[in-house]
Image (spheres, rainbow, N blue to C red):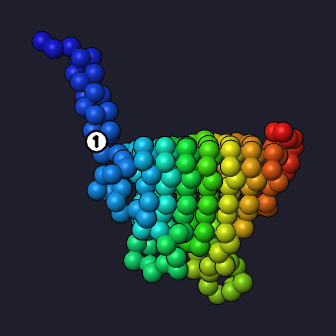
């Protein structure tokens, strides 16, 4: 009789094989839906939500972890204002469970690393009409940019209108509401400069 541990190993081996086959690799049919999906880049299986690929650019040697959501626009049917809504540079690492929600412009430059569960968006709700649910009151989109060589820690949130400079470290759990200069270390809710990387 075969050991249940061996059956478990076989199942795990199959699951790992399937995950590699189902990942989005440069040159695959799913990668061709993107505006660009650079050489040696991978989006691990499974993605959580993925649409608007025709306005998403992914650079080379970039790794996008499992359970990541990436969207350009509010829904798959939306007509977009540009073919460059979400741009991810070369040699970027997007951690497991992160969400990139771009309606206008989100740019993640080269060599940026995210921890798990980072949330980045260029859009938020409004609250000017007391008779309309907040979720139906959309504020104006504001572009977001995360500069070269930066690190964004686990569970951090980057909100609309923020530019994060080069070589910035964003502490885990931080909420970045204002732009951050180059070589800063920021942490907190809202995030404030607490040190320097340079």
Residue ID at (65%, 75%):
141
Residue 140's image quarter?
Answer: bottom right
Q: Relative to 55, say whether 39 is above or below.
A: above
Report the side of 55 relative to 22 (left or right).
right
Disc 1: CA contacts within 10 A as few (<14), some (14-19) or many (>=20): few
Q: Is residue 126 visible?
A: yes
Residue 114's image quarter?
Answer: top right
Q: Relative to 123, say whether 113 is above or below.
A: above
Residue ID at (32%, 39%):
19
Residue 72 place in picture, x, y as percent? 49, 68
Q: Quadrant of the N terminus?
A: top left
Residues 38 and 10: in front is: 38
- Reading the image, the residue beneath label 1 is 21
Residue 63 place in picture, x, y as percent? 49, 43
Q: Secondary structure at mark 1?
A: helix
Residue 151's image quarter?
Answer: top right
Q: Relative to 190, say whether 2 is above or below.
A: above
Q: Quadrant of the C terminus?
A: top right
Residue ID at (74%, 49%):
166
Q: Relative to 196, say whether 5 is above or below.
A: above
Report the side of 33 relative to 157 (left or right).
left
Task: Count the labels in the image.
Answer: 1
């Amino acid at each position: 009789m075969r050991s249940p541990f061996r059956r478990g190993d076989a199942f795990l081996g199959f699951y790992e094989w399937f995950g590699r086959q189902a990942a989005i690799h440069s040159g695959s049919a799913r990668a061709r839906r993107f505006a660009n999906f650079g050489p040696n880049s991978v989006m691990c299986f499974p993605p959580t939500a993925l649409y608007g690929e025709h306005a998403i650019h992914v650079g080379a040697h970039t790794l996008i972890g499992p359970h990541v959501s990436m969207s350009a626009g509010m829904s798959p049917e939306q007509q977009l204002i540009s073919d460059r809504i979400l741009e991810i540079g070369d040699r970027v690492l997007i951690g497991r469970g992160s969400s990139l929600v771009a309606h206008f412009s989100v740019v993640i430059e080269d060599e940026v690393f995210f921890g798990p569960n980072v949330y980045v968006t260029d859009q938020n709700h409004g609250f000017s009409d007391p008779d309309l649910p907040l979720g139906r009151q959309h504020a104006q989109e504001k572009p977001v940019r995360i500069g070269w060589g930066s690190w964004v820690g686990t569970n951090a949130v980057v909100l609309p209108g923020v530019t994060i400079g080069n070589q910035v470290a964003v502490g885990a759990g931080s909420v970045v509401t204002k732009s951050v200069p180059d070589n800063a270390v920021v942490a907190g809710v809202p995030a404030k400069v607490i040190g320097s990387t340079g």
